[in-house]
Image: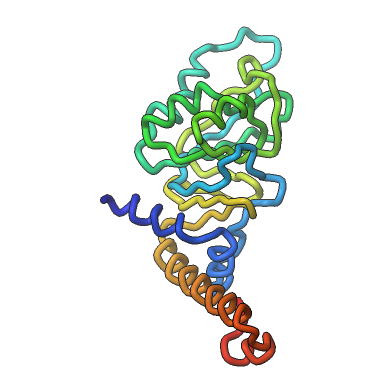
Amino acid sequence: MTDRNTIIDRTMKLYVAALSDAADEIGLEKVCMDRGIIPLTKNKRMAGFARTGKLIRSPANQPYDEKQLDVFMSLGTEAIDGDLLVIDMAGATDCSAWGQILTKIGIPKGVRGAVVDGTSRDIHDIDKMNFTVFARGRHPGTMRGRLDMESVQKPIVCGGVTVNPGNLVFGDGDGIVVIPADRIEEVLTHAEEVVATDDWWSNKLDEGEDPHDLHKEKPIP
């Protein structure tokens, strides 16, 4: 098992709130995407390493350059196992940047999910593939003629958080956290401690213990 897969497996045993709490404990700021980025698919859990793409508006009154779609598809075709695609649509809400075709391209490459600061479509078909997509909402329109690629594998902003290629991205029903590559081990270790404390509290409460006494013994996360 590769180191990347080990990290993904550890992360998937946790929950986003635990990583958020852990990031607070070690002084990491702005790791949570804003609440507008929500799961659109039935599968709401995903973890992987950011592979980023930034879109911009296509030039007006010019024929669409089909090469743009080749560049866009490279987000999936050049992905490696454990990648999670993160896309900035530059505020566009009149089309979608993710759908069933990109999902079918990404799954055989080992792509673990997608986050779009914008919109997605084909959710019914994506659900059949058990893939996870987070976005701001749905829109049936194509990006052809509306959006061009500005960059691939460069730093972007998604959900108000700066995302660098290789950052750990983790999503569940509560939202998404983004952890810098050089702080992953530290955050996961603290997050595992948070989960252990949560479990301890849950067991003690089930036993009828007084929460105020518990807080004196082990402060609530």
Rendered view: 127 above or below 189: above
Rendered view: 209 above or below 39: below
Look at the image and tell me in which quarter the C terminus lies. bottom right
Give the residue drawn at x 51%, y 32%.
Answer: 151
- The quarter of the picture where residue 107 lies is top left
Rendered view: 29 above or below 65: below
**64 horizontally vs 137: left or right:** left
Give the residue drawn at x 69%, y 39%.
Answer: 136
Give the residue drawn at x 53%, y 79%.
Answer: 200
Along the line of sight, the residue nearer the viewer: 105 or 129:
129
Name, please, the residue furthest toward the left.
1
Residue 41 at x, y percent in the picture? 61, 37
Give the residue drawn at x 73%, y 29%.
Answer: 93
Residue 15 at x, y percent in the picture? 54, 60
Along the line of sight, the residue nearer the viewer: 169 or 210:
210
Rendered view: 64 above or below 165: above
Name, please, the residue furthest toward the front.
207
Residue 65 at x, y percent in the picture? 55, 12
The number of numbered badges drawn on the structure is 0
Colour scheme employed for the rendering of this structure: rainbow
Along the line of sight, the residue nearer the viewer: 179 or 90:
179
Residue 132 at x, y percent in the picture? 54, 39
